[in-house]
Image (spheres, helix red, strand yellow):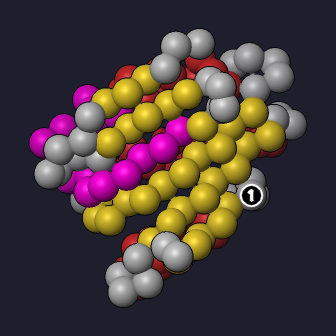
Amino acid sequence: MNELRIAGTTSTPTIHCTSVPPCVRLQGDSYPENAFELYQPLMHWLQAHLDAADATLRMELELVYLNTSSVRVMMDVFDLLEEAHRSGKSVSVRWYYDPRNERVAELAEEFKEDLSLPFEILPHP
């Protein structure tokens, strides 16, 4: 599986996916012109990675702001992860937030409520 790296901008997060170790990292703001287009390579990478019989994955998020279309895409991402988790794969999420921005922690909590996979919401140290 190849590495996926998409450079962030002022309105898009940095996206970095690696197979060794199996990790997806998103960092920054997410209010792109077209969220579905931006995240399409990530969705393809995730699907290909999770299709492997012995797939494991840790997702690390440091998202500061998400617009409505980014929230919808993240719901699709979490659906993929939840499906993998329910099929017995080791999948987890760590969402880091700035303690001065409780809104991000609340958003993460809303996502977590609908999932059974391991999902940690952690303040930045």
**Left-right relation of 125 to 93:** left
Range covered by the magenta-colored residues: 24-39
**Left-right relation of 9 to 50:** left
For image coordinates 47% across by 79% down, the residue present is 106
> What percent of the width, then of the height, locates residue 39?
35, 34
**Left-right relation of 115 to 45:** right
Residue 32 in sight here: no
Label 1: few (<14), some or many (≥20) within 10 Å? some
Q: Quadrant of residue 79?
A: top right
Q: Secondary structure at mark 1?
A: loop
For image coordinates 74% across by 17% down, the residue present is 52
The magenta stretch spans residue 22: no
For image coordinates 54% across by 51% down, the residue present is 60
Q: Amino acid at mark 1?
A: Pro
Residue 101 in sight here: yes
> What percent of the width, then of the height, locates residue 99?
44, 84
Q: Quadrant of residue 35?
A: top left
- Looking at the image, the residue that sits furthest to the front is 125
Above or below residue 121? Residue 10 is above
> What percent of the width, then of the height, locates residue 95?
54, 62
Residue closest to the eye, 51 or 10: 10
Residue closest to the eye, 29 or 86: 29
Residue for badge 1: 118
On-image quarter of the N terminus: top right
**Left-right relation of 70 to 118:** left
- Looking at the image, the residue that sits furthest to the right is 88
